[in-house]
Amino acid sequence: MRARLFRALYRIRRLEEEVARVYASDRIKSPVHLSIGQEAVSVGVCTALRPDDIVFGTYRGHALYLAKGGDLNAMVAELFGKATGCTMGKGGSMHLIDPEAGVMGMSAVVGTTIANAAGYAYALKLRRSDSVVVSFFGDGATEEGVFTETLNFAVLKHLPVLFVCENNGYAIHTHQTRRQGRADICAKAEAFGIPAERLDGNDVFGLLTRTQEVLKSVRAGGGPWFLEVSTYRWREHVGPGRDFQLGFRAEAECEPWIAADPVTRLASELSVGERAAIEAEVEEEIAAAFAFAEASPFPAPGELMTDIFQEEPDALAAR
Amino acid sequence: MPSPLVKARSTPVRDARPVAERTLSYVDAVREAADQEMSRDPAVLVFGLDVDDPKAIQGTTRGLLEKYGPERVFGTPLSEDAMTGAAIGMALAGLRPVHVHIRMDFLLLAMNQLVNVAAKSRYMYGGRVHVPLVVRSMIGKSWGQGAQHSQGLHGMFMHVPGIKVVAPSTPYDAKGCLAAAVRDNNPVLYVEHRLLHFQKGPVPESAYTVEPGTARITAVGEDVTIVGISYMQVECLRAAKYLEDVGIQAEVIDPIWLSPLDVDTIANSVERTGRLLVVDTAWTNCGAAAEIVARVAERLQGVRDLRLKRMGFAPTTCPTTPALEDLFYPTARTIASAARDLVEDGPTGWVPVERPDLQSIEFKGPF
C-alpha cells in the first residue's frame, strides 16, 4: 500500500510540476489551478473507493481526476486544447470528466457540484446500488447557499454521499477567518445531523483508513458523512507560480506543510530501488502523455457546433 | 382540432388519433402526460415544492404519489438551487427528473444550476454526458400576483444554448409537449401559465408527443400575422375575432416551442401577410417577441416590405391593484387595435368595443 500511495501522490505531483513548467510556453490553452500540496486529500480518499463509486470535484481538480483513475493522456491533451482531450478541448482544466472512471464533473463556480453529487447519490439509492458518491469542495464552498441546502437534502433522504471539504484556508487570497464568523466547518455539517470529523490532509494513511471506515457506514445505508481535511495550497490560486509576494500570506505559513509533505515522506520510507522504479515509470508515463498531447490534432472547426444538444444536427437546423 | 392546421417542421406531430373526441382540462392533460411517462419509463421522477401535498400543484401531480410511491414523487425542501443541482445529478446518473416550480419567479434561485450546469454539461464535457431534465414552472396573472409571482422569464432561457424552452397553450399541446420534454435527452424548460390551467380541449387518451421545433397555425388569414406566446395565444385568438368585425383576416400562430423555434412557419406566414405582431406574456426588451421579430426581419428583409411590432408586459414591475394591473398586460382589444394599425399602416385610434363573448374569463378571487 505504501508503494501504491507513493506512486499515486508522486504521479500527481510530477504531472502538475510538468504542467507548471510547460505553462510558460503557452502550449497549455487553459487556466490551471494546481493541487500541489493538496494531493494527499484526493489520493487518501479515492484509494478507499471502488471503480464504480462516483466523484464530483472543483476547478482545482487535477489531483481528484487522476486519483480516481481518470485517463492521463486525455487530461494533458485537454489542457492543450486538443481533440483527444477528455472533453475534446471544450471544457479545459476546470471541467475534467471521465465517466468510465466515475469522475462525473467539476465546476468553475464554487459549490456547484455539491448538489449534483447529492442528486447522483439519490439515483444510486433509488436503484438499490451500493456504490457511493464523494463530493469534493473547498472551504469557500461552505459559504455558498447550495452547500447548506444540499446537506439538508442529503440528511433528509439519507443519501449515500461522503462530503469531503478540502480546507486549504484560502478562497483565492482571503483567509477563512476573514470570511466565516465561526470558522468551524465540521460544526456546520453536525448542525444538520451529519457526523463530521477533521482530518490531517498530509496524513495519507490516516485519510485512507478513516475513509474506508466511514464508507462502510455510507455504503450500508447509514446516510451521509462529512470529512473536513486540512491542507495547504503551495502555489498561487490560478497559474503555475507562487503568490507569497502578494503579501496576503507569509511564506513561513507554508513551511510546516512542506516539511510534512507526504510525497517526500513516503519516498523516504521506500527502498531506493522501489522508489527509483516507481519514479522512472511515472516519468515515462507523464512524458508519454505530454507527447500524446503535442502530437494530437486540435478539434476541427465543425466541432464548435457539436454536442450542444444530445441529438444532432436536427435541433440546430431549426434555428 | 389540431390536425388540419398542424404545421410540423421536420418531425411530424405524432397524433394518436387525427381527431380526439375526449375533452380534458390543461391540468388533467399535464397530469396524464406525467402519469403515462412515469408508467412507460421507471427512470422518470416528479418532485418539487408541494407536488405531493393535498393541492397537488393545481391537480397536475394528483395521484402520482399513490401510484408511483414517495421515491419517485416527492415534495422537496425550499432549496431551489440545491434541488435543481440534485436534479442534474440524477439526470447525469440516467434518471429523467421533472422538477416542478409553482411560479417561474422561483427559477431565479436556480439560475446557476440551470444556466451554468444543465445547459452546458453536454457541451463542456465534450458530449460525454447528457442531462435529460424537465423544469416545469408557472407564470401567474391576475388576482394580485404582483411583482414576484407574475414574471415570464422564458426569454432569459432562450438566450442560452443547450436548454430548450416550450410554452404550450392548449391541453393537447400541454400533454404532447410534456411527453416530448420528458423523452428529450436535454434540459427542457416547460412554461405553463396559471390561467391556461383552466383551458379545456380535445386530448387523445393514448400517449403522443409534440416535438421540439413545432409551431402551429391556429387561425388562417392573409392580412396580418399574429404570434401569441403562452397565455397570449388565447388573447390573440380573441383579437382575431375583433379584427374579423372590421374585415381584417388575421393569421394567428402559436410558436409552442420557443427554443428551438419554428421560424419557418412564422416567416412563411409573414411573407404572405407582410405584417407581424408578436405578443408575449413577458417584457419585450430582449425577449421572445424581440427574438421572433428579429429572425423574421433577417429572413425577409429585402424580400418584401415588412411592418413589425412587439407587445408584452408594460416595461415596469407588475402591480397588484387591478386598476394598474389591467394596464400592464396586452388584451384582446389592445392586440386587435395594434394589429389594425399595422394593417392600416398607421395609428387608427380604433379599439374595439368589448364583446361579452370575448371577455377574458379569469380566476375570480378571493385567492
Image: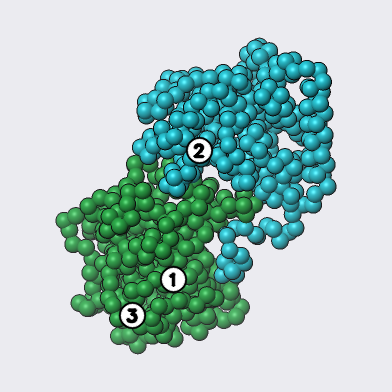
Chain colours: A cyan, B green
Q: Residue at x 57, y 76 (%)?
A: B300
Q: Residue at x 62, y 67 (%)?
A: A313
- Residue assigned mark 2: A132
Q: Position of residue A233 (x, y in %)?
A: 63, 23
Where does label 1 land, which residue? B209
Q: Where does the image place residue B78, in percent across and percent down from the top left?
A: 34, 42
First in sequence: mark 3 vs mark 1: 3
Residue at 16% over, 56% down: B366
Q: Which mark is residue A265?
A: none
Q: Amino acid at mark 3?
A: Ala
Mark 1 and mark 2: Cα distance apart in space: 36 Å
Q: Are marks 3 and 1 in contact (CB under 8 Å)?
A: no
Mark 1 or 2: in front is 2
Which residue has dot 3 on it? B20
Secondary structure, mark 3, is: loop
Up/down of A32 relative to B117, above or below:
above
